[in-house]
Amino acid sequence: SKFFIDNQLLDDIDQDDFDAELWGDHRTYLSLWNELTETRVEERLVFSHGDITDSNIFIDKFNEIYFLDLGRAGLADEFVDISFVERCLREDASEETAK
């Protein structure tokens, strides 16, 4: 958070762990923070499962869909569940499948 940046509680970005795809041209946490806050969009809250991964979705022999583990369910940004599904596909299938 900005508190950690302002109080210099974050180490410099470890260049060995640097991922240009994630960080782009940013070389400092402050630079990334500034861009994120300047380009932030208004959240639209919807009902979200909150942890929608392949292990929390079941389809029976009649193609009925069941959702398990609703412990994180509630109001969240409309893209929360979409991002969980994308990550699950990317990690368990492939980058191409996730697109």
Image (cartoon, rainbow, N blue to C red):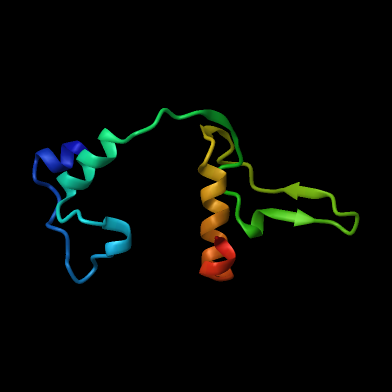
Direction from residue 96 to residue 7 in the image, left or right: left
Quarter holding the C terminus is: bottom right
Quarter holding the N terminus is: top left
Where 45 sits versus 85, above or below?
A: above
Q: Residue at x 51, y 33 (%)?
A: 76
Residue 82 percent coordinates (x, y): 56, 47
Direction from residue 8 to residue 57 in the image, left or right: right
Q: Residue at x 17, y 67 (%)?
A: 15
Where 96 sits versus 69, above or below?
A: below
Direction from residue 12 to residue 73 in the image, left or right: right
Instruction: Compare residues 15 and 95 and report the one nearer the observer.
Output: 95
The tally of labels here is 0
Instruction: Compare residues 96 and 79 and report the one nearer the observer.
Output: 96
Q: Give the image quarter of residue 61.
A: bottom right
Where 95 sits versus 46, above or below?
A: below
Direction from residue 64 to residue 16 in the image, left or right: left
Q: Residue at x 16, y 59 (%)?
A: 13
